[in-house]
Amino acid sequence: DGGITQSPKYLFRKEGQNVTLSCEQNLNHDAMYWYRQDPGQGLRLIYYSQIVNDFQKGDIAEGYSVSREKKESFPLTVTSAQKNPTAFYLCASSPESGKRIYGYTFGSGTRLTVV
Amino acid sequence: DAKTTQPNSMESNEEEPVHLPCNHSTISGTDYIHWYRQLPSQGPEYVIHGLTSNVNNRMASLAIAEDRKSSTLILHRATLRDAAVYYCTTGNNRKLIWGLGTSLAVNP
């Protein structure tokens, strides 16, 4: 079955370390997104990418970096510059066809905790 | 960016219809209205989306006000599996603005 796979499901990071969250999709979707979810808050956009080798900052990009070398993959690196990285991270994808709008497909998330 | 406002929580009985409201009074003319639902520790699941006209799919119906400043997600017969947090979002494929959602409880 097609879908989005996020790994790992749980991740623990020491302060000062960089960590990379994996996101892979086999839906042949062009667009991919990274969101952060904190308790009591809605999802906030970190980065998005509409095509390979191109990505745009979202609302809270500081302290994060991404790459889009392949259509299927959109890894997120949480750097030591991110002061409050403990959160639930969600990856999503959608078809991209210009004017037509599609719903997003989400992965099951990665819960990152700073220890 | 358009902001969405939803009730914090709602309750329904099994096999009864549920109407989940959402206000998005600052929505722009080209923004779509999306609904997703989320179970604890899982990613959101797409439910439905629309622009101006009412929309139906196998999961739900979406009723959009004529002035597009509000919308209502309709679950025609609630089941226990429909208990979740329902998010109303607005935007386009580049950016969706997410509110805090409505936690729906379904009583057997």
Image: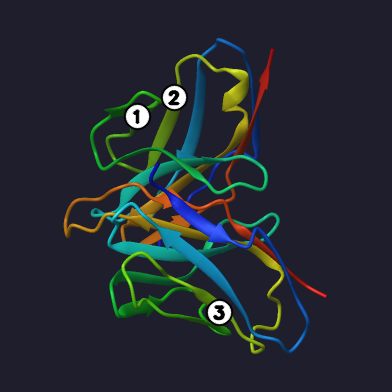
Q: Give percent across and percent down for residue A71.
A: 31, 67
Q: Which residue is mark 1?
A: B63
Structural crowding at the residue carrying mark 3, measured as other residues with C-alpha within 10 Å and reported as few (<14), some (14–19) or many (≥20): some
Which amino acid type corresponds to the residue marked 3 in the rendered image?
A: Thr
Q: Classify residue B108 by image quadrant.
A: top right
The quarter of the picture where the C terminus of chain A appears is: bottom right
Name the residue nearer the viewer: A71 or B55.
A71
For marks 2 and 3, give the CA distance: 39 Å
Q: Residue furthest right?
A: A115
Q: From the viewer's perspective, is the residue at label 1 or at label 3 nearer?
A: 3
For marks 1 and 3, give the CA distance: 40 Å
Q: Which residue is mark 3?
A: A77
Write the residue at 65% across / 58% down: A9
Q: Is residue A20 visible?
A: yes
Of pointers 1 and 2, the one earlier in the residue sequence: 1
What kind of element bears circle 1?
A: strand
Q: Residue furthest front?
A: A1
Q: From the viewer's perspective, is the residue at label 2 or at label 3 nearer?
A: 3
Name the residue nearer the viewer: A100 or A19.
A19
Q: Which residue is mark 2?
A: B74
Q: Are marks 2 and 3 in contact (CB under 8 Å)?
A: no
Q: Chain of mark 1?
A: B
Up-down: is A64 above or below A10? Answer: below
For marks 1 and 2, give the CA distance: 8 Å
Q: Chain of mark 2?
A: B
